[in-house]
Image: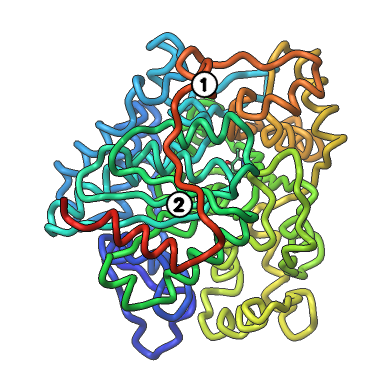
């Protein structure tokens, strides 16, 4: 399997191996990496895979994308990652052994549980594997890395829990000082591992993000301190997410002739991009139902053909905050497929986006491409704060199940597109315990917390508070990278 960049329009596109693109993230031309062609699964493979445990299925799927790590090593990494102990969320081992169990609400409508990992959000599904892959690849090469990121919540904690105690890896995670919930702060700052560094900047998330960009743009510093990233465009994260679409399909259908629909609460288009790829591999996904919150960049595109990233001032702060995005960083991967894998066209379109503009695929110039959209199975919708509260109440009243705010967005839009002849699985992307305030607003009672997280707000915290100053952050990194 070789990988190409969505923007590589040279006559002989450069082809990279999995390990090469795993460590580099973004392609040098600014594009995103994708397999040169999607591997197809045969009917015989589907029949065999239906019976597999999560870890065995993950090995089968990932082997199609990773061929430069010896099979025995990959198997060991996957077995170590997808265990009941890691994905138990405080419950009995029998239930947790499935890793991503389906919770049926009624016949034909279920929740695919993706948030039973250490930080109670679906990002653990991929990030835990990433931690193990990083450690493995770096150890083999005798290298080390310093991961630098900015977070407003879920990504930072998932990254820290995945990298804590890993050899050869340090994590420097920037977050906006006093802008996250007490629970989110505790999840990150209470980690006492020597390789985890939390930096709270006196500013907003965007200020933290700008510091990260400034450090990455300093090529000398980046090289000297081998600065790396684990953001949502990392191909390994997308590949790891493909696995649970297969697992969900097998749980939701009787045999491999049936079709299924997945409803996905979306922000950066990472999660649902994996669903698109599973479908391109031949998994019988009838529909991909994409749900946005008030930040409806993606809903607008699928309805109108116009992709119009927002400015930060036009980006709303909502009660499903992990979907509060101004542009969808993985979306370029889908558009690359939609336009027949034409890197020159992607360059033209993203030259507009990167300059702060937009493009309209429904315009006559591009209409030839846009007419293929229905072939990709997407339907979309949006959900607001009022919808979220109503859905959380309704699901609790009808089924006695508490869902988090993001999953509620998925359920709301799923209800608009469900078909009686096709089972629908809504991807549960977080536990309600993470969003206590809105659940209490909707139901008048607080969501239960898993044992391991009770009272974490009272634990001692390790965090360095700093001004919005990229040089101060660089000095901090340098000071903590000197050999002891
Ligand atoms: C990150 C996140 C999302 C959005 O996923 P994308 O891959 O960015 O589309 C949805 N819900 C929760 C809880 C998340 O943490």
> In the picture provided, is 472 more to the left or to the right than 309?
left
User: Can see residue 180?
Assistant: yes
| Residue at 12% in and 54% down | 140
| Residue at 32% in and 55% down | 65
User: Can see residue 279?
Assistant: no
Q: Nearer the viewer, residue 407 or 40?
A: 407
Q: How far across and down, in percent of the image, does residue 406 sit?
A: 68, 36
| Residue at 44% in and 63% down | 472
Q: How far across and down, in percent of the image, does residue 331 sit?
A: 59, 63
Q: How far across and down, in percent of the image, does residue 378 sit?
A: 68, 52
Mark 2 or 1: the one toward you: 1
User: For mark 2, does the 10 Å Cα neighbourhood hold few (<14), some (14 to 19), or many (20 or more) residues?
Assistant: many
Q: How far across and down, in percent of the image, does residue 335 sit?
A: 60, 68
Mark 1 or mark 2, which is nearer the start of the sequence? 2
Quadrant position of the N terminus in the picture: bottom left
Relative to 156, residue 256 above or below: above
User: For mark 1, does the 10 Å Cα neighbourhood hold few (<14), some (14 to 19), or many (20 or more) residues?
Assistant: few
Q: Ligand 1 is found in which quarter of the picture?
A: top right
Q: Which residue is mark 1?
A: 458
């Amino acid at each position: 399997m070789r990988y190409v960049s969505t923007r590589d329009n040279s006559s002989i596109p450069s082809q990279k191996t999995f390990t090469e693109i795993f460590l580099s993230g973004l392609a040098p031309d600014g594009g995103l990496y994708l397999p040169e062609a999607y591997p197809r699964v045969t009917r015989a493979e589907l029949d065999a895979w239906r019976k597999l445990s999560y870890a065995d299925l993950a090995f089968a799927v990932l082997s199609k994308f990773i061929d430069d790590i010896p099979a025995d090593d990959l198997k060991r990494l996957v077995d170590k990652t997808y265990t009941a102990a890691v994905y138990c969320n405080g419950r009995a081992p029998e239930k947790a052994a499935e890793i991503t169990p389906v919770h049926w609400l009624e016949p034909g409508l279920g929740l695919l549980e993706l948030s039973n990992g250490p930080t109670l959000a679906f990002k653990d599904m991929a990030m835990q594997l990433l931690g193990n892959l990083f450690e493995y690849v770096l150890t083999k090469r005798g290298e080390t890395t310093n991961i630098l990121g900015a977070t407003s919540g879920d990504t930072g904690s998932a990254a820290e829990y995945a990298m804590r105690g890993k050899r050869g890896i340090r994590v420097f995670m920037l977050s906006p000082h006093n802008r996250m919930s007490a629970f989110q702060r505790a999840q990150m700052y209470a980690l006492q591992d020597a390789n985890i560094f939390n930096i709270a900047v006196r500013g907003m998330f965007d200020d933290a993000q700008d510091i990260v960009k400034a450090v990455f743009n300093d090529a000398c510093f980046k090289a000297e301190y081998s600065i790396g990233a684990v953001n949502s465009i990392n191909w390994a994260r997308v590949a790891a997410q493909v696995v649970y679409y297969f697992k969900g399909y097998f749980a939701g259908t009787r045999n491999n002739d049936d079709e299924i629909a997945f409803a996905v609460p979306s922000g950066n288009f990472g999660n649902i991009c994996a669903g698109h790829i599973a479908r391109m591999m031949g998994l019988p996904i009838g529909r991909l139902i994409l749900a946005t919150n008030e930040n409806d960049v993606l809903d607008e595109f699928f309805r109108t053909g116009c992709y119009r990233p927002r400015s930060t001032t036009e980006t709303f702060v909502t009660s499903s905050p992990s979907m509060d995005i101004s542009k969808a960083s993985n979306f370029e991967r889908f558009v690359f497929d939609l336009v027949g894998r034409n890197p020159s066209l992607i360059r033209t379109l993203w030259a507009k986006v990167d300059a702060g503009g937009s493009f309209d695929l429904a315009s006559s110039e591009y209409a030839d491409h846009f007419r293929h959209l229905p072939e990709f199975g997407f339907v979309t919708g949006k959900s607001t704060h009022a919808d979220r509260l109503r859905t959380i109440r309704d699901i609790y009243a009808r089924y006695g199940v508490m869902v988090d705010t993001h999953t509620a967005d998925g359920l709301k839009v799923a209800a608009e597109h469900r078909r009686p002849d096709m089972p629908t699985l809504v991807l549960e992307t977080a536990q309600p315990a993470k969003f206590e305030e809105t659940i209490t607003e909707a139901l008048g009672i607080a969501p239960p917390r898993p044992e391991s997280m009770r009272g974490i707000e009272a634990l001692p915290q390790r965090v360095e508070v700093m001004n919005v100053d990229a040089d101060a952050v660089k000095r901090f990194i340098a000071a903590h990278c000197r050999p002891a």
